[in-house]
Amino acid sequence: MRVSLSTLQSGGTTTKSMILVTQCPSMLALGACAAMARSIVVSTGGKKPSLQSICSWLEFFLEVAAERQGALHLGYPCPLLTYLGVVLWGILNFLPWGLMVIPCKWLVERYFGPDPIVAQKASLSRVSRDLKQSERGRSELAEAPQRANEFFANMEISSLWWRVRAVRGTHQLLRRLQLPMNVTETPSSCWDTAQDQLDEMLLQLAARRGEDLKALLQEEDGSVNEQCLIQIFDSATAAISVRRNDMVRSALTQIAERSVEDLLLGITALHFPLLQETELTSMLGLRVQFMGEDAVDMGGVRKEFMDCFAEALTREEGTSPLSLIERLCLLSLGADSTWRPLPCDEDERGYLWALGRLLALAFVYRCPCPLQLSLLVFKCILGVPLRPGDVRQLDPDFWTHRVKPILQPGGAEERQRQLSSWGMDQLTFTSADGSRELKPDGATLPVTEQNKEEYAQLLCEDFLIGPIRPEIGCLIMGFHELVPEDLLSASNLDAEQLRMLICGSNELDVDEWEQYAVTEGPPQVIGWFFDWLRKQSAVARSKMLAFVTGSSVLPCGWQGLRDPQGRFLPFRVQVEGNATALPSAHTCTNLLVLPPVLERWELESRLAKVLEFAGREMLLA
């Protein structure tokens, strides 16, 4: 049988085509399996190393099998194990040459520097990643006011609503005001802490203000003036509206305009136990509203205002020449790096009087104002005499050369002989610069051994506060108008305790912070938070405290965190919510909410973002 060459060629082609057609499904199946293995590796993202290793090796063997199938289709028969050995031999043969890239790259970077294109690409990638995180943070902060409005939308806390409630509930309030008054009796023993002393003094102040309120409301026939009561509650629940660009002047002006009854009505309510059960109590006293900002003061805005006020009052840079508002300067920095009143004219002394009122409000409402005032100011408020030891601590040179020699035995006579030998006037009861008399007719009264102690006392007092005596007097007058001097003296508070209660303390010990914190959630995340705090500076710790509580200082220790009614309000840490969210805070309850992250670095990076973005532009509730 004879077969033509063309027939054999056409038959061979047909046979090869049939083989390709029959073998294509096996190649496609192997390719599909390899693709599935690769997709598993990509989808897990390296979070499961064992699964990633299994899928990677499976993908390698599937690709080798697919390549062998391709060789078979091309007419090169080869056993599978032989083909696999050839592939492995090729890998091992060329692997050293591939590894040579690493030392070559190191040598090039060592002598010629890194590739600028690669470095620029890495820098741009890092900047892009940071920008994306910043944009997410800004978007969350932008949505915060809307979330706050939605959260408080169904709460009856607007000032207008409270005024309506005050009018509608007048008869009920009148009945409660006419009930017998119950003042908690406390033992006359010495208080253990400054906080206990403050509690006792506030009860006494509430009792006195309660009697004054009843006398103000009671008519001659024994009835209560309902209209007067409505006016008092109406004005007491109105917030003080301040401008951020003129914080000091706008705040002090409104505080000066308020009556004592309005400012202390929140303390007066402590005298009426039944009145404390009403929701109106939380709206009495000092409430603050920043103009143009939607925020409800349930304690957080008040604390933020105190921080902002202290910062604005002690800001050293001057006002811009183009500014339409002149900066109000009331304090100057002393030699001990603390602030004290600045000599000023009659108009500005009125602001110092209002500043004294503000310090009294910070004292009675347990809302510290972080002003680093001189201890001399608080001694003057308490009526404690200034001693030569205060001069010795403040200015050792003045003490050594001017005061100490006179107090030595025979020191006054020796100083008079020295002045006479030098042809100078004798030493009299005048100030160190000779511009002020230390007592009436002091310029004609010489210093002797008999009166030198009185002279040293008056000289030291004049050296400390002589030039600013009228200014300190205005500040003390404003403070005592709200907190009477006799109650303050009876409280047995010393100057350091009073400064801590009014100005707070910025010394934040993280171990004590963690000890007194109330936590809820995974202990690991909470531990990461306090470990991060230990690595931060004092300024960063104060910022975090202000982010959570609204105030950058502590009032008399961690146990001094109280609400305006005196109830203990500890620092709370709660881990909940979305793992991708930024940490958030509720300043009215001292609550910090941390996201349930899985890694330490994630929490630390988000806490750093919080400190970066948590400025005074945030709306605190």
Image (tube, rainbow, N blue to C red):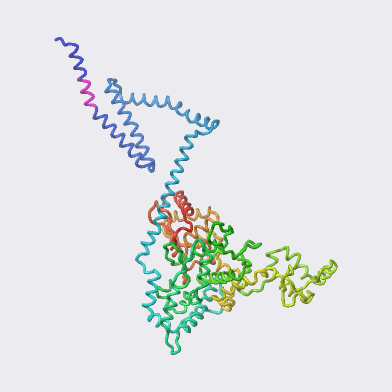
**Furthest residue toward bottom:** 221
Residue 386 visible in the displayed image: yes
Q: Nearer the viewer, residue 62 or 317?
A: 317
Residue 409 visible in the displayed image: no
Q: Which residues are magenta?
A: 14-23
Residue 532 percent location from the top left of the image: 50, 53
Quarter of the image with the C terminus is bottom left
**Furthest residue toward top:** 2
**Magenta stretch contains residue 436:** no
Q: Does residue 56 lie above or below 23 as drawn?
A: below
The residue sitting at 47% across, 69% down in the picture is 240
Residue 159 percent location from the top left of the image: 40, 70
**Furthest residue toward left:** 1
279 left or right of 421 in image: left
Q: Quadrant of residue 503?
A: bottom right
Q: Quadrant of residue 298?
A: bottom left
Count of numbered tags: 0
Q: Does residue 262 lie above or below 89 as drawn?
A: below
**Magenta stretch contains residue 15:** yes
Residue 343 percent location from the top left of the image: 63, 67
Q: Nearer the viewer, residue 37 or 483?
A: 483
The residue sitting at 38% across, 59% down in the picture is 146
Quarter of the image with the N terminus is top left
Q: Does residue 448 lie above or below 32 as drawn?
A: below
